[in-house]
């Protein structure tokens, strides 16, 4: 209970006496004073009636200056608060300045995530292409990328750098189709980049929204507003124009990028189903979710990689690469493996902090940065019509992300 009462000069003498006794403890004019005094009697004053046996806390300001002047007919207001608890209550109040700082810190955090995501993706694509040029075995290259990420996360969990996730059998059952689609998409994209320029692979991969709409419409039975369908026209037209005018066109590289698009669409569909299914209670997100996905994909990919390429082919190719490149080749392999995991990890961490629309826009900008940087670094010859097709496809991807919202 909180009670508040007014005291006149006549009934304030007892309070003044208490204040005089404690006046030495007041060093500043506006320092708050808290006194505890149990009330055992019922006051006869008409202005207050307190019968509580609980401690009474008196808080006032300006007693020091009041003691100096002491007007004869002065009144002062005293608020009494009964102590219902021995511990103070927590009060988390954000003031405008704190809210502004909090919003600014969140924006800075997202900006760092985006910049890191884009930078790591660019570095991965550069080293991945260098490795594939010297060591054209995409199945092993894909396997090493997943193995490096899995090893990094196991060490992080063992050393408690990252908190290990709580999973059950249902979680892994739900993750299995996601991992299958992720494995197919990852290997197909690597096969594509082993046959064609990095820029061409990413131009074709920018057509992923078209696959998403077609699969969702004809297989899942979903419908979309007309602007979404219209946004597919520049995507399909731009990708087609870029493919027709590509100087170093390769059908295997083109089909690898197309299969990668389709696989990643199914990965997203399976992921969405898993989040709304029985395993939704096991919330594993961001960094840990991708770590579990990498480990399961590694188990799926290993037997297929051995069957398609095999250790003997890998050993011969490794010796050839070392003879041509030297010890730097080992660094290239390690870099592309580590940066692959890191850029995917930051993309999932970014998705935890932002809306799907913002993520789609960020993904579009990421493709632009990869295409431009790879053209500059590898000095890829580009015709004006080819560049126009890439620009149209990327614009269509941006329009799709806007129309779908």
Image (cartoon, rainbow, N blue to C red):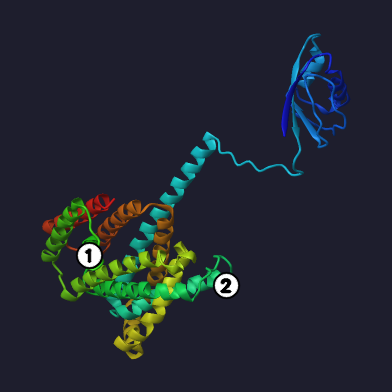
Q: Nearer the viewer, residue 300 or 197?
A: 300
The residue at 31%/57% (across/down) is 363
Q: Quadrant of residue 214?
A: bottom left
Q: Quadrant of residue 341?
A: bottom left
Position of the N terminus by quadrant: top right
Q: Can residue 106 be seen by looking at this rendering?
A: yes
The residue at 35%/54% (across/down) is 356
Q: Is residue 346 left or right of residue 256?
A: right
Q: Quadrant of residue 189?
A: bottom left
Image height check: is 321 above or below 273?
below
Sequence-first tag of 1 and 2 = 2
Q: Position of residue 337 (x, y in %)?
A: 40, 72
Q: Is residue 143 left or right of residue 2?
A: left
Q: Nearer the viewer, residue 110 or 272?
A: 272
Q: Position of residue 44 (x, y in %)?
A: 85, 21
Q: Which residue is mark 1?
A: 211
Q: Nearer the viewer, residue 370 or 108?
A: 108
Disc 1 crowd rating (10 Å Cα; few below 14, some 14-19, many 20+) is many
Image height check: is 268 above or below 4?
below
Looking at the image, is mark 1 or mark 2 nearer the viewer?
1
The residue at 34%/72% (across/down) is 182
Image height check: is 86 above or below 6?
below
The residue at 51%/43% (across/down) is 102
Q: Position of residue 70 (x, y in %)?
A: 81, 12
Q: Which residue is mark 2?
A: 158
Q: Can residue 319 be seen by looking at this rendering?
A: no
Q: Is residue 60 left or right of residue 343?
A: right
Measured Cα–Cα span from mark 1 to mark 2: 40 Å
Q: Position of residue 231 (x, y in %)?
A: 19, 53
Dot 2: element: helix
């Amino acid at each position: 209970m909180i009670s508040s009462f007014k005291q006149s000069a006549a009934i304030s003498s007892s309070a003044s006496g208490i204040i005089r006794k404690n006046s030495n403890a007041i060093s500043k004019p506006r320092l708050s004073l808290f006194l505890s005094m149990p009330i055992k009697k019922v006051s006869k004053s008409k202005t207050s009636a307190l019968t509580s046996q609980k401690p009474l806390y008196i808080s006032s300001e300006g007693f020091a200056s009041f003691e100096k002047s002491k007007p004869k007919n002065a009144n002062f207001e005293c608020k009494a608060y009964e102590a219902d608890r021995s511990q103070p209550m927590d009060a988390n109040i954000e003031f405008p300045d704190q809210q502004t700082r909090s919003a600014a810190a969140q924006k800075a955090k997202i900006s760092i995530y985006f910049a890191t995501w884009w930078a790591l993706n660019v570095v991965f694509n550069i080293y991945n292409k260098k490795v594939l040029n010297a060591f054209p075995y995409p199945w092993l290259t894909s396997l090493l990328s997943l193995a490096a990420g899995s090893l990094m996360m196991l060490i992080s969990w063992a050393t408690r750098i990252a908190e290990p996730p709580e999973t059950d059998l249902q979680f892994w059952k739900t993750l299995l189709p996601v991992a299958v689609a992720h494995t197919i998409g990852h290997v197909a994209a690597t096969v594509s980049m082993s046959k064609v320029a990095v820029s061409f692979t990413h131009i074709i991969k920018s057509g992923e929204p078209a696959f998403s709409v077609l699969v969702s419409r004809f297989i899942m039975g979903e419908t979309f507003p007309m602007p979404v369908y219209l946004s597919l026209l520049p995507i399909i037209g731009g990708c087609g124009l870029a493919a027709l005018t590509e100087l170093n066109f390769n059908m295997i590289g083109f089909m690898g990028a197309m299969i990668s698009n389709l696989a990643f669409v199914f990965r997203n569909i399976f992921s969405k189903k898993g989040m709304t299914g029985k395993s939704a209670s096991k919330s594993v997100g961001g960094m840990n979710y991708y770590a579990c996905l990498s480990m399961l994909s590694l188990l799926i990919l290993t037997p297929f990689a051995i069957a398609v390429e095999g250790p003997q082919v890998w050993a011969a190719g490794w010796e050839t690469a070392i003879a041509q490149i030297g010890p730097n080749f080992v660094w290239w392999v390690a870099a592309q493996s580590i940066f692959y995991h890191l850029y995917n990890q930051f993309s999932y961490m970014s998705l935890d902090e932002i809306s799907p629309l913002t993520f789609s826009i960020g993904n579009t900008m990421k493709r632009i940065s990869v295409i431009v940087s790879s053209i500059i670094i590898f000095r890829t010859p580009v015709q004006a019509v080819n560049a126009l097709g890439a620009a149209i496809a990327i614009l269509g991807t941006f329009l799709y992300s806007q129309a779908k919202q």
